Amino acid sequence: MVSLLGLFLLAFSAATLLPGGSEVAFLAMASQSGHTALVLLITVSLGNILGSVLNYWLGRAALHYQDRPWFPVSKPTLANAQRWFKRWGPWSVLLAWVPVIGDPITVVAGVLRLNFWVFLILVSLSKTLRYMALLGVVRFFAGL
């Protein structure tokens, strides 16, 4: 069984650009551990939110290095991401929970220097509501 620290670290890494997920561990712990759903929700949400915060700060620092040959994103790709984010604005951060696109959105929010507190509120809502919904859906179907 994964510990609370393990769940936190899984959620943290899942929110970064590293591959991984925390949903299975979260749901397994919710059904089998002695921890309350609230403790698990806080743990997994906090880890995931802080992983997104890391992405945000990496994005803020990234533009300083964009002209270096080793920079991992091409200029056209970066320009496309910036156009997309400018079109949808801060509200796009609410999609931070979506697999594949969510993590890059948090990086682009940093690149475009979205106000940190706006970012933190939106990403916190996004991540926490996702885990709440996931837990609710599983509990609903388990109760049928």
Image: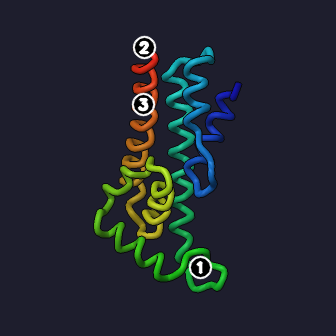
Q: Residues within 10 Å of mark 1 (few under 14, many from 20)?
A: few
Query: Helix, strand or loop at disc 3?
Result: helix
Rendered residue at 54%/24% (across/down):
39
Q: Position of residue 135 (x, y in %)?
A: 45, 27
Give the color scheme: rainbow, by chain, secondary structure or one colour.
rainbow
Q: Position of residue 123 (x, y in %)?
A: 42, 48
Rendered residue at 39%/51% (across/down):
95
Between the residue at mark 3 and the residue at mark 1, the CA separation in whole angstroms equals 38 Å
Quadrant assignment for the N terminus? top right
Q: Which residue is mark 1?
A: 65
**Quadrant assignment, res 93:** bottom left
Rendered residue at 57%/30% (across/down):
26
Question: Depth check: 9 or 143 in front?
Answer: 143
Q: Are dots 3 and 2 in contact, CB under 8 Å?
A: no
Q: Amino acid at mark 1?
A: Tyr
Between the residue at mark 2 and the residue at mark 1, the CA separation in whole angstroms equals 52 Å
Q: Which residue is mark 2?
A: 143
Q: Which residue is mark 3?
A: 132
**Between marks 3 and 1 in the image, the one whose residue lies nearer the viewer:** 3
Query: Helix, strand or loop at disc 2?
Result: helix
